[in-house]
Amino acid sequence: MVGRKITVPKLLIGAILSVLTLTMFVPIMNLFAKAFSSPDKVRLIHGYDIWPKGFSLVHFQVVFSNPLIGRALLNSLFITIVGTCISVFFTTITAYVLTRKNLVGKTPLMIFLIIIMIFEPGIVQEYMVIKDLHLLDSLWAMVIYRTINVFYLIIMMRFIEEIPESLMEAAKIDGAGHMRTFTSIVLPLAKVPLLTISMFYVVARWNEFFKSSIFLSSRENTVLQVLLRQFIVEGDTSALVGSANLLKNNNIAQLDFSALKAATIVIAMVPILLLYPIILKHFAKGVMEGGVKE
């Protein structure tokens, strides 16, 4: 077996990618270092430190001692989980319908969807629709908001079109209807693109801040990202500081708010960081299978 030849351009590319990786890795690890450091030593953490000073979970205890944080986290999880399930279901079943050769008006419908993807409606129009549905300040506004992403729909369509038509015909001969064909043939064969678009939907819904700040106005229905923004940008520390009794019980006279900020950012990042490696291996395969048609 002949080894790959190492050339100067390859070394240069590797060095550039390594530097870029460090520029992304160090700030994240610095946040973890601040979040897990003890309150009396957190000020020793500087911009390039990646290890905590005196391991402690006090900052997380203080953050979670505020019931508003727990409520915001549950709201974010509800929107992400329920919204992703609904989006994946409707995206997949719509892709199946649009790939049927006998569908009347398929071409005009696809043109309409492409136009929507390119020329998105403005926030004013979206706000008026949510208002007319009486969903302002309701978590369901964020759950049903943009249920189907046209780009992810096209990925699913390209994959379903690759499923042999003979399987569909065999199911039809056996008496299976469209729903039975969809659940028994299409879904089992579409695990890779399903995981791919599911990850896309999860990341998009979990990180959604702008529309959440517009559609959700009350503290009870706020999400973690909006709360985090209030703390970081507006300096609303009361949104994140927890019980004074907890500080007293831990003999903490004063907390470093940059450490509280870091702890909250870590809480917001952890779900995605845990989920991403699980299905990372399916990303490229899913996009390629859905984007290439032979």
Image (cartoon, rainbow, N blue to C red):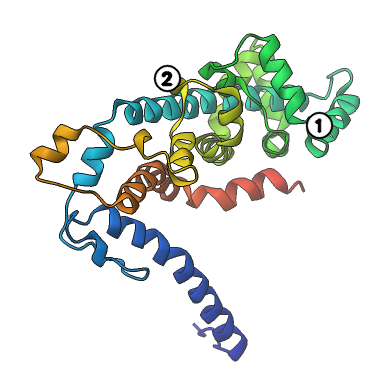
Q: Is residue 43 left or right of residue 135?
A: left
**Which one is in front, 8 or 214?**
214
**Which one is in front, 251 or 65?**
251
Comparing marks 1 and 2, which lies closer to the viewer?
2
Q: Position of residue 17 (x, y in %)?
A: 53, 74
**Residue drawn at 73 percent across, 34 percent down:** 150
Disc 1 target residue: 116
Q: Position of residue 202 (x, y in %)?
A: 51, 36
Q: Is residue 256 left or right of residue 41?
A: right
The Cα–Cα distance between marks 1 and 2, rounded to whole angstroms, is 33 Å
**Which one is in front, 106 or 18?**
18
Q: Amino acid at mark 2?
A: Glu
Q: Amino acid at mark 1?
A: Ile
Residue 220 badge: 2
Say above or below: 114 vs 3: above
Q: Secondary structure at mark 1?
A: helix
Mark 1 or mark 2: name the one nearer the start of the chain.
Answer: 1
Q: Do the residues under discs 1 and 2 have CB atoms within 8 angstroms? A: no
Image quadrant where residue 119 sits: top right
Say above or below: 163 vs 98: below
